[in-house]
Image (cartoon, rainbow, N blue to C red):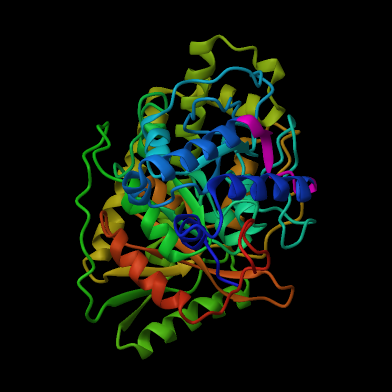
Amino acid sequence: MRRDATDLAQAIRNGSLTSVEAMQASLASAGDHKTLGTIAHLDEAVGMASAEAMNQERRSEPGRFAARPFAGVPTLAKDLGGPFEGLPVTAGSRLFERAGSEPDSDLANRFRQAGLCLFGVTTSPEFGLSLASEPAAGPICRNPLDPARTPGGSSGGAAAAVAAGIVAIAHATDAGGSIRVPAACCGLVGLKPSRGAMPAGPSFGNHLGGIASELAVCRSVRDTALIFDTLHGKAKGPFPDPETVADRGGRLRVGLLAETGSKYPTDSKRLETIMDAARTLEADGHQIVPLGWAEFEQSVDASSRALGDIIAVNLASFIDTLELDISRAEPLTQAFIERGHALTGPTLWASLNGAVHTSRALWIIFDRVDCLLMPMLAKAPLAIGSFPFDHGDTELQLERMAAFAPLASLANISGFPALTLPFGTDADGLPLPVQIMAPMGHEPLLLSIAARLEAEERWQHRFPVAGLAA
């Protein structure tokens, strides 16, 4: 089953269903899947008004309507990032009330210009501090493929909603794997774009010093390519727009990393999936270049340290600026805030230097290869409750995240684009993901390789898209 947002947009465009009917189907599906906890806030009136506006535009301005790639397609915003006007965001925290909203961010405006119709916000862990999505403020988000397991985090609600078919595409953010990990848990495609490719203003500031990016979780590579092409570029700082390099085809040098070391071991089935993907590409004539964990180990450790320190300092500054009462935050969140306050200048500087060296080390590897093929998750999606917030050990949380997705934060800290997609199914019917990474601006290359692997049809979505026949 490979129906996606492109199919839904085409059905609306050719009149098989209207924008309003598509929205009604998504709202009904949200009710049917309520126990999954995918949606933290739903506003039917906002969704219907947006869909009705698209219906009206289709009648009165058909050319303008047809030019929107996702005209009339229902979607959801993440409860972190954005913001999207009319949809109050709380970052999964009891520190905020679900009332009022800020004006559209630059990215939110581009979502709307693409024709996407928003009707709610998806569940996120408090301030995105987890690879699960179980905020104390609720709801606990579950994986539609196995409700006893997490859909990942921090864009877990977005991924669960797309995998369940409530929507065909959903807004997501990625500061330490938060697009790619949920996509990997739920059998979706997730792209973390190059640093500077996506607009960050005005409210999201400097995107955690450049480690965070926004895009979407998708059911297909073609949806991912279309949403990226629609939204990226002319970001207006704080980083230069990376030049997007067209995929020129031809024989590639594919760096193969099929191990993650003894500290963060990846299970054999997931490593075998990486090898299967490599064999597929090799059969197409590409050169496979084996790489060892020793070339990545120092960068992985440096990435984890930088991730923890950057998040902590950013969160402490945010709390201080708004003069919030942190006693209402979850214990682990409070610990990250305290870590940020306690960090000395030299300690933070050392972490930032580690980030610079990580980027440099990857550039050197990319002198030898055109892209990297590597694991996304070290194991199957974990049980609900595997990332508790009822403690104050920030290092334990970072270790737990690294053990689950050892190579996730590498792309965030370095700034390189990375993409995950499913390439098989394990004995429990759960996706077996692979991750591909490329130099800055090479999203077209990532998408081309992903499309080739997707064509093998080793994964099929379990749930149909609301509004589309299975």
Regarding residue 93, the answer to whether it shows in the image is yes
Q: Quadrant of the C terminus?
A: bottom right
Quarter of the image where one finds residue 195: top left
Magenta segment boundaries in residue numbering: 35-45
Pick the front one: 384 or 386:
384
Q: Position of residue 47 (x, y in %)?
A: 59, 36
Is 2 left or right of 71, judged from the image as shown?
right
* Quadrant containing the N terminus in the rendered view: bottom right
Residue drawn at x 64%, y 56% as measured from the top left: 466
Query: Is-magenta flag for residue 40?
Result: yes
416 falls in the magenta region: no
* Residue 415 in sight here: no
Drawn side of residue 393 relative to residue 138, left or right:
left
Q: Which of the 4 quarters of the picture holds residue 345? A: top left
Residue 174 x, y percent position in the rendering: 47, 45
Image height check: is 69 above or below 446?
above
Q: Residue 465 location, x and y as percent?
A: 62, 59
